[in-house]
């Protein structure tokens, strides 16, 4: 998790930055005395959590939030002004409002609340992505054919082509196994051999160095057996 601290008071900036470094969930702490500099940084780097002062010259904290209104981050406002909390919470990204001087107890509560919200948000995004990315389109004779991931039993390398086996049909596609693998859901498919990718849901049996899918025996490559077991629900 990346965080940014924005405060034109250097002492406050360094204190908040030091407090952030106490949390193992935070990978990097980026300090900015100017909101504009932080915006430039965020154009290149994902920031998950922002600690933001309100009263700053030329471009204040609210200007910053309005400019980045649609960005995907959470913000904790830290200010010496008690009167702006109602306005602050009109921004959906604002998690908490802390009045200086900072009380460590309330600071910790605010940070943990932000962590929880960010974690929930990331889980929802991952779930939505999996729901949306539940299929692949393949090019067969200049026609794009949709195949749902659940329908795929296995994918086999075949020279400059790959064979995509479903329950009722085998599709032959001009592609590499590596290219196909990059488009699949990693928690559903597994490359068990240099020539095979299998759908974990359709594995019927595993015996020694082979597995059975739809009455076909598929080899398990050296060194991947343990990784395969880690992917499966074993008793």
Image: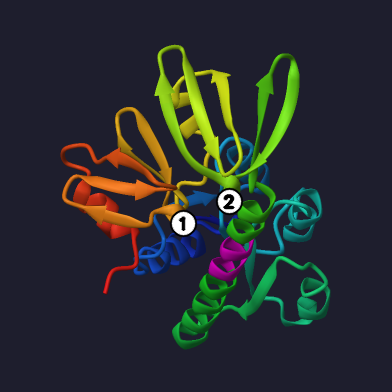
| Image point (37%, 57%), residue name | 204
Residue 16 is situated, as x and y percent measured from the top left of the image, at 47, 66
Q: Is residue 97 above or below residue 168?
A: below
Q: Is residue 165 above or below residue 58?
A: above
Write down the quadrant of residue 122 in the picture. bottom right
Left or right position of 123 against 18? right
**Residue span colored magenta:** 118-124
Q: Which mark is residue 150?
A: 2
Mark 2 in CB contact with mark 1 (< 8 angstroms) = yes
Callout 1: 10 Å neighbours few (<14), some, many (20+)?
A: few
Residue 193 colored magenta? no
Write down the quadrant of residue 26 in the picture. bottom left
Q: Is residue 109 above or below residue 185?
A: below
Q: Which mark is residue 139?
A: none
| Image point (26%, 57%), residue name | 229
Residue 76 is situated, as x and y percent measured from the top left of the image, at 62, 70
Secondary element at image label 1 = helix
| Image point (30%, 29%), residue name | 194
Colour pattern = rainbow
Q: Which mark is residue 201?
A: 1
Which residue is more in the foreground, 105 or 92?
92
Secondary element at image label 2 = helix
Left or right position of 200 against 180? left
Residue 119 colored magenta? yes
Which residue is more in the foreground, 129 or 231?
231
Callout 2: 10 Å neighbours few (<14), some, many (20+)?
A: some
């Amino acid at each position: 998790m990346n965080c940014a601290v924005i405060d034109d008071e250097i002492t406050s900036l360094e204190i908040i930055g030091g407090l952030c470094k106490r949390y193992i969930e935070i990978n990097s702490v980026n300090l900015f005395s100017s909101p504009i500099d932080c915006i430039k940084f965020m154009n290149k780097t994902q920031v998950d959590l922002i600690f933001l002062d309100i009263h700053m010259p030329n471009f204040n904290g609210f200007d910053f939030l309005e400019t980045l209104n649609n960005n995907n981050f959470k913000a904790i406002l830290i200010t010496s002004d008690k009167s702006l909390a109602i306005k602050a919470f009109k921004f959906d990204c604002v998690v908490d409002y802390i009045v200086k001087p900072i009380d460590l107890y309330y600071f910790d509560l605010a940070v943990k609340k932000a962590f929880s919200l960010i974690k929930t948000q990331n889980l929802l995004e991952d779930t939505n992505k999996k729901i949306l990315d539940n299929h692949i389109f393949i090019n067969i004779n200049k026609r794009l054919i949709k195949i749902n991931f659940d329908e795929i039993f296995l994918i086999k390398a075949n020279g400059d082509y790959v064979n995509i086996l479903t329950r009722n049909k085998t599709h032959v596609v001009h592609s590499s196994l590596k290219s196909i693998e990059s488009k699949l859901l990693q928690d559903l498919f597994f490359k068990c051999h240099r020539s095979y990718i299998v759908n974990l849901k359709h594995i019927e049996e595993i015996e020694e160095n082979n597995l059975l899918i739809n009455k076909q025996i598929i080899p398990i490559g050296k060194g991947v057996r343990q990784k395969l077991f880690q992917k499966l629900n074993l008793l």
